[in-house]
Image: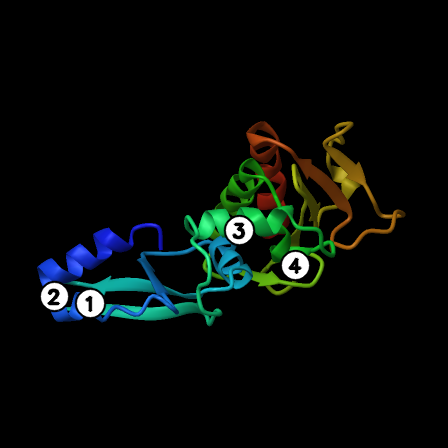
Amino acid sequence: MDHKAEFQFRALERISKESADKIDWSSPRLICVAADFTKYDAHAVQQIDRSIELIRYRQFGNEFLLLELVNSTSGKSASVKVGGASKIAKSKNKSKGPTVYGAEALITANPETRELFESLEGYAMSLGDDVQSKDLKLYIAFKRIRNFTTVEVYKEKLLLHVHLNPDKVELVDGFTRDVRHIGHWGTGDLEVWVRNRTDLERAKPLIKRAHEG
């Protein structure tokens, strides 16, 4: 919407002047095509009041290309200029509203926390083809037959509950804690705080043990 002239010129160059003159700017539609999308992408799209489609592609050899619709939203007609999805998301983040949990909390988390979650998710999913990710109301769960790790997303950190016996883990103050007798949302008796890459690397062996559990 900030580059109407460039878009019209491209339409004029590639199609015709008549087509360029007939462009309807009242309800723009954005189609994003990529090899994959993160949970943050899907949830961010849901927060933006625009028509946006996320399409994942898969290539099979040199003959077949699969296009899969991952997410789709229908927004209102455009009434103001916007600088892109990221700016809309940022403006919504600044507005006051109810506290969000689960995967929706990724919208209000800072970029470093989102990157930490994406790395953690990638690691958990790489542990086996039987690993599933499930978005629940209060947290995100990684499971086989049952949950082995759950994640609560906060603005500047991740709170993990790992399905391990705390008695068999060397507890580190500020990083891990026995919560068998403390109320908590996630499933698992070992609490793990992940605030940075170092914490994530320390948490990976615990997640792996819980997965093998």
Residue 89: give its label: 3
At label 2, counting other C-alpha atoms closer than 10 Å, the crowd grade (few under 14, some 14-19, many 20 or more) is few
Q: Amino acid at mark 2?
A: Lys
* Mark carried by residue 147: 4
Relative to 148, say whether 22 is above or below. below
Distance Cα–Cα, label 4 vs label 2: 58 Å
Residue type at mark 3 is Ala
Q: Are marks 2 and 3 in contact (CB under 8 Å)?
A: no
- Write down the quadrant of residue 173 in the picture: top right
Residue marked by disc 2? 17
State the residue position of label 1.
Answer: 21
Q: Amino acid at mark 4?
A: Asn
- Marks 4, 3: nearer the viewer: 3
Eye-nearest disc, 4 or 1: 1
CB atoms at circles 1 and 2 under 8 Å apart?
Answer: yes
Kind of residue sitting beneath label 1:
Asp
Which residue occupies 48% across, 69% down?
75
Whether residue 140 is visible: no
Residue 195 visible in the displayed image: yes
